[in-house]
């Protein structure tokens, strides 16, 4: 029976390290910029960014399906929520690449926004690669 979690390790992480008390804010710094914003404990990072009116990460569906809010966590501790493996692979997650809408900060974080991988190899099936106009390469 599937647990609904992206991995058994992610589920165990949530059990071993439950979120801290709600209301406590953590500082999130965006690497390579002067941007930083507070994010409350107990809510996903993307939601904290929106509440702080910061524009650090592109906002999409807010539920993990679109993958637009891809980031790399450079430093800090966070709780992982279930993530779509079509957007974040196990290797990505092991390298700190996650979706901002699917992590909950447990302390201060340093993040790097990443570009969206629009089409993965598995998603190109059925995509028409024929030029739109004759003579176009």
Image: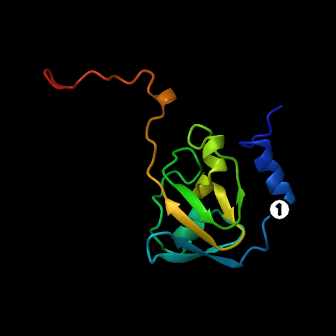
The image quarter containing residue 79 is bottom right
Q: Which residue is mark 1?
A: 17
Question: In the current view of this chain or complex, which residue is farthest to the left?
Answer: 135
Q: Secondary structure at mark 1?
A: loop
Colour mode?
Answer: rainbow
Q: Residue at x 42, y 21 (%)?
A: 126
Q: Residue at x 69, y 47 (%)?
A: 82
Instruction: From this view, report whether residue 6 is shown above or below residue 62.
Output: above
Task: Provide residue 20's location: percent of width, then percent of height.
Answer: 79, 71
Q: Residue at x 38, y 24 (%)?
A: 127
Question: In the current view of this chain or complex, which residue is farthest to the right?
Answer: 16
The image quarter containing residue 2 is top right
Q: Residue at x 48, y 34 (%)?
A: 120
Task: Provide residue 36's location: percent of width, then percent of height.
Answer: 52, 76
Please tell me which residue lies in front, 53 or 135: 135
Task: Provide residue 121's location: percent of width, then percent of height.
Answer: 48, 29
Task: Provide residue 69's location: percent of width, then percent of height.
Answer: 51, 55
Q: Residues within 10 Å of mark 1 (few under 14, many from 20)?
A: few
Query: In what quadrant of the picture does the C terminus appear?
Result: top left
Left or right: 130 in relation to 14: left
Query: In what quadrant of the picture does the N terminus appear?
Result: top right
Left or right: 38 in relation to 77: left
Instruction: From this view, report whether residue 88 is shown above or below residue 125.
Output: below
**Total numbered badges shown on the rendered structure:** 1
């Amino acid at each position: 029976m599937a647990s609904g979690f992206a991995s058994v390790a992610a589920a165990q992480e949530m059990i071993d390290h439950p979120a801290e008390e709600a209301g406590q804010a953590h500082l999130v710094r965006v690497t390579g910029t002067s941007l930083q914003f507070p994010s409350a404990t107990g809510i996903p990072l993307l939601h904290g960014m929106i509440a702080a009116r910061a524009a650090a990460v592109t906002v999409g569906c807010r539920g993990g399906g679109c993958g637009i809010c891809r980031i790399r966590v450079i430093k800090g501790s966070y709780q992982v929520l279930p993530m779509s493996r079509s957007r974040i692979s196990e290797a990505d997650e092991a390298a700190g690449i996650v979706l901002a809408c699917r992590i909950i900060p447990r302390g201060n974080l340093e993040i790097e926004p990443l570009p969206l991988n629009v089409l993965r190899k598995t998603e190109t099936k059925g995509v028409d690669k024929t030029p739109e106009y004759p003579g176009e390469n």
